[in-house]
Image: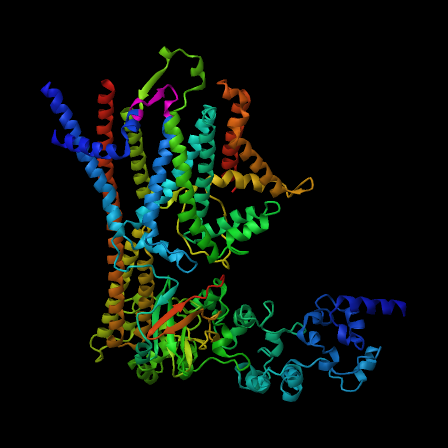
Amino acid sequence: MFKKSFVYLMICMFSAVMVSAAENNCLTCHADFEEEDGPSHLITKDIHIQKGLGCVDCHGGDASLDDMDDVRDSKGYKGVPSYKDVPKFCASCHSDAAYMHDHNPSMPTDQLEKYKTSVHGKQLLKKGDTNVANCISCHTVHQINTAKLPHSSTHPHNIPETCGKCHANTELMKGYGLEATVLEDYKASVHGAALYERGDLSAPVCNDCHGNHGAAPPGVSSLVAVCGTCHAIESELFNNSPHKVAYEENDFPMCMTCHSNHKILKPEDKWIGTEEPALCVECHSTDDGTTGIETAAGISNALKSLVQAQSEAQLALDEAIEKGMATTDAEFKMKELRQSLIQTRTKLHSFNLDSVLPRAEQGMKEADEVKKNSATLIEEFYFRRKGLGVTSLIFTFLIIGLYFLIRKVEKK
Amino acid sequence: MSDKNISSKMFDWVDSRFKISALVDYMGTKVVPTHSHSIFYYFGGISLFLFIIQVVSGILLLMYYRPGADSAYESVQFIVSTVSFGWLVRAVHSWSANLMVFFVFLHMFTVYFTQAYRKPRELTWLSGMGLFALTLLFGFSGYLLPWNELAFYATRVGTGMAGAVPVIGKDLLIIMRGGTEVTGATIGRFFGLHVAILPGLFTLLLSGHLIMVQRQGMSEPIDWANKSDAEKKYMKFFPNFVLRDLLVWLIVLNIIAVLATFFPDGIGVIHWPLGEKADSFAPPPAVIRPEWYFMFAFQALKMLPSHILFLEGELVGIIVFSLGGLIWAIVPFIDRKAAIDQKSKLFVAFGYFVLAFIIFMTLYGYMVE
Amino acid sequence: MSGEKSRRGFLEAALGGSALLAMAAIFYPMYQYITPPKLAEAKLSQLKLSFSRADIESEPKKAKYFKYGRSMGIIFITETNELKALSAMCTHLDCTVQHRPDLGILWCSCHNGRYGMDGSNISGPPPRPLYPYQVKEVGETIFVSKEIADE
């Protein structure tokens, strides 16, 4: 008896199970025979325990009983659910709007409904395929946590790895005809770079495009809308462009056609143009009956000259800065020029010269201003040097004159 | 020869009214001793010339400068970027200020080591000490005026030290800052000090200093007391010495022009880039340091332990500095030997100690950064 | 004797000439300095805008941009006819935000960042609100300023 109460005391001390501990006899035995990574040890960091729930709130049974066999026979005992039954097991609370309201009113209760629509849910619930993800595949068992905590498996920073547990597994993916390179591709993408290198948590991770509980690849028709949640202007321009209709007719995957999906790289100006590696020529040719090639040439030229003008302006500005001149105005203009270049590149999604060229021209004007402004400053720099030269010459002359005057005066 | 007539007529016109011929005759008889340390006689003149440059460039800056937390930085930026030759005026003012402090130091130490403060020049020395203190105050108050990051923190630390003065420290700090913190109110105070109070006092004291120098002439080396007249050499003050002074001034002016053009923002530790506007909420820069001529005091106070016996370390430092300064100021009255034209080893040693302390602490201060 | 005299004359002329030139070298920059520049005084942290409320109203998006120091601001008219000014630089990646009276928000087109009329970041990537400027209307003239926190 003494030994038992000692263990009990220890568990009390080393776990956060304070609230329900008084009634929770489960851990008394489970902590005894389970390894360090067993449920009774992991559970202490789980949000359910922290919110005051006990083992029996999920697993059922009577926690006040001393004997494990008695618990098994007690009223409402559910034990461990089968893999297929896990969604229902969790949903017994999470889909109960009244119950959830009492614990976390702002939390949605439609996870199971969404899961049923997901590829995972269909495979598991309809086909009984236990290789696909259910709740615990992403949320873990007994270490479940809110996505806000940085160590949580569902925190944005950890999501790619969480999904990658399965989707980067070549063996597993082979069975579904899926590429297992998605994680690798994502990490190489601009979005991956924003997340990992800049630590930008607003960068899209897997679930931002695929959904989470209702995870499924976006369909061709919805792709523009999905990318458009962030790239609003691009998608609006694209929807009004001649490409929209053409892509629909040919069943091209919209944004993906040029930008790919997981390995979305930083777009380069050479992607547009009239010869390789421009992507335009994969469909367009001079005699295809469209203005495609003409437009590609026009946009490409506008971008090339703007980039050229920008680098010239930067060079001039750098020289002025290096010479220590006051360049605040020129630097400000330079910022506007950068904005113009970004916007010109954005506008090209209209695939319409009338929309792209005016923006590019405005940028060219700004570049000219930066160059002119910097040139004036550099000129001023040399003017100062020359002015000093002339002044010093005059002073030196005067000094020498004075020297001779002194000599003459002292000779007397 | 007609122009000579005009100038002599003009002289007669003034002389008949103000009787200046006696003064002119007196200047004509004035001589300057010639010896191996004659170069020392130029340092005071150079300091004077630099002060004149300060007044002229300062007045020019005043035309565009506007004190206040929301205008000071902007107006200085305007001066250096938009006003033609504004960069030059600011650079000249800053360079000349630093050189002035340097030459005032040099002038003071050469006077000290030649014991030129001895009787009958006690008051000249005292007025010189006053001018020295005013020069440092000029530097301290002027540094804040651009209201940039550098100045803001240097002033916060500098005025903070004043807060350690016993009894009156807290009030002194509030009076200096115009509040408990360095704010726009501080600019108003420092501005008034820098462009009105200090120039007024300085001009007054400087006039006294110069009149005394002219009346008593240049001090002769202390060992000339035992020399025969044949061994002593002199040059005429006018025109010989004046022309030489002019020559040196021109060289100094040219050096300032070169420095201001090549290094408008200063160089090395003598550096005053405008940088970012002062912002009390921004994190302080990595290195907060005073201007180079305050470095020795700053470093010495920094090195003191927090408590010496029952007193606060900073307080002890301030007491020691005040005492040292006091002894330095009244040295002509306590150096009895010099008063009878004998070199006093004790006071020369004290001078070397002070000089070594200042040089060591300054260098050390920059090295530990 | 005459050689001596002419040498002396030369020295005097050279001295006088170079003294005059030196004076010119000193006074030329001073004269240039006191000649007021095109923009006759410094722009202060209180900025006077070059346009009026009517100009902003006539814009299709009821907003105009202004340059403030090194950054750019946007001033716009709200539904309740108030003038509001905010920093125009999106806190996500420094794109320029625009006023969308149709949506009642400020919008950054780069990544669909949305801000409320008070500058609060309401959706999309922006991590922080936009910095607000103080707006003062004196007759036709609009002044904007940064809050000076230390006074």
User: Which corner quadrant of the image does residue B254 belong to?
Assistant: top left
| Residue at 31%, 51% in the rendered image | A325
From the top left corner, tell me how far across and down residue B87 is, in percent: 32, 49
Tell which of A25 and C130 is nearer to you: C130
Quarter of the figure with the N terminus of chain B: top left
> How far from the left and from the top, in percent, is residue B169?
58, 48
Give me the residue at 73% from left, 83% from top: A78
- Scheme by which the image is coloured: rainbow
x then y, percent, for residue A85: 65, 84
Residue B217 against residue A262 in the figure, above or below: above
Among the 4 quarters of the image, the one containing residue A244: bottom left
Confirm whether the magenta stretch covers residue B339.
Answer: no
Residue A308 seen anywhere in this rendered image of the structure: no
**Rendered residue at 40%/30% (across/down):** B212
- Say above or below: B29 vs B159: above
**Outermost residue, left direction?**
C2
Is residue B28 covered in magenta? yes
Specify start and end residues of the magenta stretch as a single range: B26-40
Is B200 placed left or right of A138 in the picture? Answer: left
